[in-house]
Amino acid sequence: MRKTVIEPNGKNFQYWKDIWHYRELAYNFAKRDVTVRYKQTRIGLGWAVIAPIINVFVMTFIFGNLAGLSSDGSAPYYIMVYAGTIPWGLFSKGLTTSANTFITNAAIMKKVYFPRIISPIGSAVAHIIDSMISMSVLLVMMFIQGYLPSLRFLLFPVFFLLCLILGTALGLFLSSFNVKWRDLAQIIPFAISIGQYLTPVAYSIDSIPEKLRLLYSINPATGVINAFKWCIIKDMPFDWTSFLIALAWIVVLIPLGIHLFRKTERTFVDIV
């Protein structure tokens, strides 16, 4: 009689087949995340619009008005800022939820079997929903301003997903350390807050002194955010250097993150 052994770190293809079989669970995780996020709020999904707009006004005032920095290309400054906050939000949220997945979903992970990587995948889908709302707002702002997008706007889903993949892969890498060292859960939000100012989200990469641009490009988020902004801003040049560096980060972090994640899911129950 043939026996099937279920183990979270199996050395066969069953784990990856299970991801497809449990695909509906990823949708349920996404639905749960969106529901919990806006549960018992009067505005509900409206916060997906209000929060980014408030952030844009603050960033525009700090970098555009007080610091006097220039925009990318001919885009109005606040549109450039909004175009930068959308991919940054995807990157930072994907990083945070993936890094904390063993902690936030420990209760259900201890009770039933499913490929644990389904959890961060579901959270990633939930972030896409929020970001698509923000994209709709950006389009409205552009039409009101009379700043119509060019055909390269159609490429935004590619860089949209690259931002999310990069953040999620980095989060998977950190999740294994987060299980053992809980201080990391406190460090990550702080690092993301600082990182937003060290990444060309609310200002142009051209505002950085040329001798420091390569250093800025080592930041994995710089390349994908610049590429996303390139889709929105018609006369912004494409920064190949930072983009290729970002792709290199993705190529390294995806297999490394998955390897450490699967290694941790075997024993995390004994630690959490």
Image (cartoon, grey):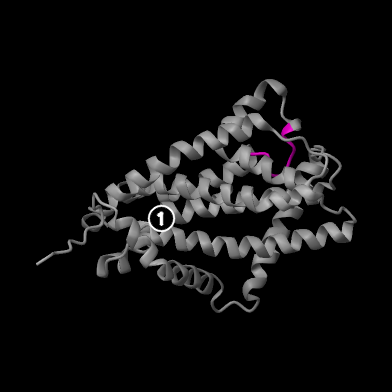
Residue displayed at 63% across by 25% down? 214
Using the image, determine if residue 158 lies above or below residue 131: above
How many numbered marks does the figure carry? 1
Drawn side of residue 113 relative to residue 204, left or right: left
200 within the magenta span: yes
Drawn side of residue 202 relative to residue 160, left or right: right
Q: Where does residue 134 sit, x and y in percent of width and height?
A: 69, 61
Secondary element type, mark 1:
loop
Residue lying furthest top: 211
Q: Main secondary structure of the magenta part?
A: loop
Q: Where does residue 190 sit, x and y in percent of width and height?
A: 52, 46
Residue lying furthest right: 146
Camera-nearest residue between 127 and 8: 8
Corner quadrant of residue 139: bottom right
246 within the magenta span: no
Q: Which residues are magenta?
A: 199-205
Q: Is residue 219 visible?
A: no
Residue displayed at 33% across by 44% down? 259
Count residues near mark 1 (Cα–Cα under 10 Å), then give few for <14, some for 14-19, many for 20+.
Answer: many
- The quadrant of the picture occupied by the C terminus is bottom left
Using the image, determine if residue 54 lies above or below residue 175: below
Q: Is residue 72 visible?
A: yes
Q: Where does residue 118 sit, x and y in percent of width and height?
A: 39, 61
Using the image, determine if residue 165 lies above or below residue 105: above
Residue linked to disc 1: 100
Residue displayed at 87% across by 53% down? 147
- The quadrant of the picture occupied by the N terminus is bottom left
Residue displayed at 35% across by 59% down? 103
Q: Where does residue 129 sit, x and y in percent of width and height?
A: 60, 65
Amino acid under disc 1: Asn
Residue lying furthest left: 1
